[in-house]
């Protein structure tokens, strides 16, 4: 019974300390910010554009420029792939590591 009381008292003290720190930090932040006007949101969403983007048929990009961009991107990736040094050849058998069972 004594340990239960001690546990409840410790939990109460911990909760009180947590609340006090949280309240102190919130008060300090509010004091630092003061009565500054809130800045407007940098992101604006046009409802009509959002509705159009959500429609499955309109979300597909069929612009001819997209095909040109994809082609150029594939060419660039192929160029990068050919410029990389070749990988060293893989050994025919895995290396023998002492202590490792070979299955």
Image (cartoon, helix red, strand yellow):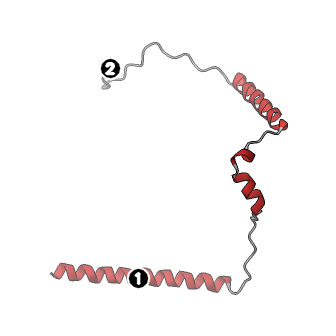
Q: Among all residues in the image, which is located at the extreme top?
A: 92
Near-viewer residue (88 or 79): 79
Give residue 62's quadrant in the image. Answer: top right
Decide: is 102 above or below 66.
Answer: above
Give residue 67's position: percent from left, percent from top: 80, 33
> Where is the N terminus found, in terms of image quarters?
bottom left
Give me the C-alpha separation between circle 1 and circle 2. 58 Å
> Where is the C terminus found, in terms of image quarters?
top left
Decide: is 23 above or below 89.
Answer: below
Give residue 61's position: percent from left, percent from top: 77, 42
Near-viewer residue (10 or 54): 54
Residue at left offset 74%, top offset 70%: 41
The residue to which callout 1 is attached is: 17
Q: In this view, does 12 lie to the left or right of 61?
A: left
Residue at left offset 25%, top offset 78%: 7
Give residue 34's quadrant in the image. Answer: bottom right
The residue to which callout 2 is attached is: 102
Residue density around tag 1, few if under 14, some if 14–19, many if 20 or more, within 10 Å = few
Q: How many numbered circles does the render carry?
A: 2
Near-viewer residue (54 or 26): 54
Please, what secondary structure does the residue beneath circle 2 have?
Answer: loop
Q: Among all residues in the image, which is located at the extreme left?
A: 1
Residue at left offset 33%, top offset 83%: 12
């Amino acid at each position: 019974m004594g340990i239960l009381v001690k546990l409840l008292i410790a939990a109460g003290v911990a909760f009180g300390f947590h609340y006090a720190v949280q309240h102190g930090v919130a008060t300090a932040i509010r004091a630092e910010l003061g009565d500054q006007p809130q800045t407007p949101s940098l992101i604006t969403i046009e409802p009509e554009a959002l509705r159009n983007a959500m429609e499955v048929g309109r979300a597909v990009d069929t612009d001819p420029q997209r095909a040109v961009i994809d082609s150029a991107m594939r060419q660039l990736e192929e160029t990068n792939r050919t410029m990389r040094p070749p990988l060293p050849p893989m050994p025919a058998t895995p290396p023998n590591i002492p202590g490792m069972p070979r299955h």
